Amino acid sequence: MEETTVQTEHMAKYRKSNLWKQVFRRLVKNKMAMTGLGFLIFIFVFCMIGPFFSPYANGGVDAININQPPSAEHWLGTDALGRDVLTRLMEAGRISLTVGLGAMVMSVFIGTLLGVLAGFYQGIVDQIIMRTADVLMTIPGLPLLFIMAAVMSEWKVPAENRLYIVMVMLSIVGWSGLARLVRSQILSLREREYMHATESLGLRDRRKLFVHLLPNIVPLLIVVGTLSVGGAILSESVLSYFGLGVVPPTASWGNMINAANSLIDFQNRPWLWIPPGVAIFLTVISINLLGDGLRDAIDPKMKSR
Amino acid sequence: MDQKEPLVEVKNLKKHYKDSSRSLFKRNQSVVKAVDNVSFTIEEGETFGLVGESGSGKSTIGRSILRLTDITDGEILYKGKSVHQLSKQELREHRKSFQFVFQDPFSSLNPRIRIGDAIGEALLDHGLATKKEIREKVLEVLNLCGLAPYHIDRFPHEFSGGQRQRIGIARAIIMDPEFIVADEPVSGLDVSIQAQIINLFSDLQEKKQLTYLFISHDLSVVEHIATRVGVLYLGTLMELGSRDEIYENPLHPYTKSLLSAIPIPDPTVKRERIVLQGDVPNPANPPTGCKFHTRCPFAREKCKTIVPEFKEVEANHFVACHLV
Ligand SMILES: Nc1ncnc2c1ncn2[C@@H]1O[C@H](COP(=O)(O)OP(=O)(O)OP(=O)(O)O)[C@@H](O)[C@H]1O
Ligand code: SF4
Ligand SMILES: [Mg+2]
């Protein structure tokens, strides 16, 4: 008897993981998604671990070697303060990736929470949440970010904490789309007979939400979450480029490109702005490829859309 | 007749759906009277068969009785208590004693939940048993419902339609209910499986002294299990009587037509064949007078204007027709 229960439990674990295993197998077969994932891993390792191997870490200013083109000592040259561009690129990547991931986590959390509340409780709760989302969605994201950034720059936040402000701003702008998706998913799940069954069994709301509804929207969250990291990184770059996001001396890919702002730098010192540009481009493309691959792997039916 | 209080009493039940398809410029509100003044009782221990075509309001009645939907008017008494006036807490208590078995065996189970958990979760949620006790109880009802112990850790997609319906029944039975509404529990299944599931319902009724409201669009399905039958047309009861009365002495033209569509295995029994003309009218715009008059082969002039009374023609046999 003992043995058989152990065996059935083992089988059950196998089956449970099977669903996700299938997803994984489909994802691995997708060459584009795997390329994206490969690049992301590379970029991640490059930014997070790279600085430890650099002799120029922690923004060492070198007044003698300013604006040097790439050389054996400085593979990507130096900037106007004589800092090593390669090292700075890696340090900036840490910030940009952190902001992207942080903003994603926050907006997924807010979007899921509000979307679930709206879809599950409906009525006045739904009205308030969705009208707010509508308003946010009718205002184009970037101008809204600019306004918020302008207001927040009044608050004299220390430069090294600016990235948290940027995360919060991006998630305030970013939750509404996800909230809508989650809400409509919840509304359609509510009409399944198994949800009527939870009602007829008299189950508590807590169980309906956490056992029956949330697990069914996890795939959606994974896909939307992944894709939104790319968007957040882009927005952060734009903000920082305009000096409204992460500000120097803290480096971010966006404020590094700012170098292209000056005509001399743009024409004569491409090592200042091409590397961060390429980094942003590759990261965002890779994230999108991975996100699309995840979507196809999780729900092959969604592919046609 | 003994004077025992009925288990369920449906009094003048009305349920209207407002279909407000509002466009920017016009606003046409049509009201669908899904259930239109229906009254009947269900006695303890019986099986009440509710029969009608698609869209006649069968599910709506079943769902109203268990308060899975609000009602527009009327009253539903369960053991003398008005179901739609219970507080949230009282309702949760009541949910233990009446259960629902759903029509679609595929969508009635959450694809991500193992069937052992699906069957046992209500006990857990109501705090009626510990996890260990629940596993034992689940195994017990699996056995009662003709499923194997090793099914407990499987996911719904690993089962056939008939097995899933057994799971749905097990989920209802584990609460030890007194009353079960079974909403077309066999209509999604192969004919060969239907009989097995109906037998399961009968067995369980015997073992657990259950009372059923058994819904079907097919009179032949209900024949073997019902003790009384109500025939519904466009949200209104047309005929109501004991099983024997309905099948051997049908009085309403609609009931007769439904019965005449069932092939009879015994060639010595003759039954006049009534073929209905036309389709079921749009429920948003039902016929005046007798709702059946557009399709009734015996319709008279007065049928078009005067609503026939639902009267007791013989003892406990009610019919709504001017001819009877
Ligand atoms: N949520 C709803 N909103 C609007 N109209 C509804 C709703 N549910 C049911 N109706 C309408 O009420 C009427 C009765 O529906 P109901 O589901 O009770 O019929 P039924 O007899 O169970 O049919 P079926 O055999 O197809 O299950 C139908 O005309 C249907 O269109
Ligand atoms: S009342 Fe008239 S129309 Fe209605 S069933 Fe009887 S005969 Fe037919
Ligand atoms: Mg129905």
Image: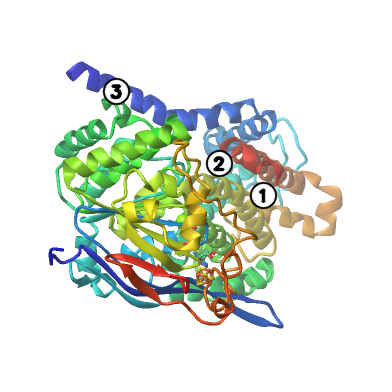
Chain of residue at mark 1: A
CA distance separating discs 1 and 3: 70 Å
Residues indicated by labels 2 and 1 sit on the same polypeptide chain: yes
Q: Residues within 10 Å of mark 2 (few under 14, many from 20)?
A: some
Helix, strand, or loop for circle 3?
helix
Q: Nearer the viewer, residue A98 or B151?
A: B151
| Total numbered labels | 3
Residues indicated by labels 1 and 3 sit on the same polypeptide chain: yes
Helix, strand, or loop for circle 1?
loop
Residue assigned mark 3:
A8
Judged left or right of residue B282, residue B308 is left
Q: Nearer the viewer, residue A33 or A66?
A: A33
Q: Relative to residue B211, is residue B13 depicted above or below?
A: below
CA distance separating discs 2 and 3: 55 Å
* Mark before the other along the chain sequence, 1 or 3: 3
Q: Residues within 10 Å of mark 1 (few under 14, many from 20)?
A: few
Identified by mark 2, the residue type is: Ala
Q: How is the image coloured?
A: rainbow
For the N terminus of chain B, the image quarter is bottom left
Residue assigned mark 2:
A57
Q: Nearer the viewer, mark 1 or mark 3?
A: 3
Q: Nearer the viewer, mark 2 or mark 1?
A: 2
Q: Relative to residue B168, is residue A203 depicted above or below?
A: below
Q: Position of residue A271 (x, y in %)?
A: 77, 43
Chain of residue at mark 3: A
Residue assigned mark 1:
A63
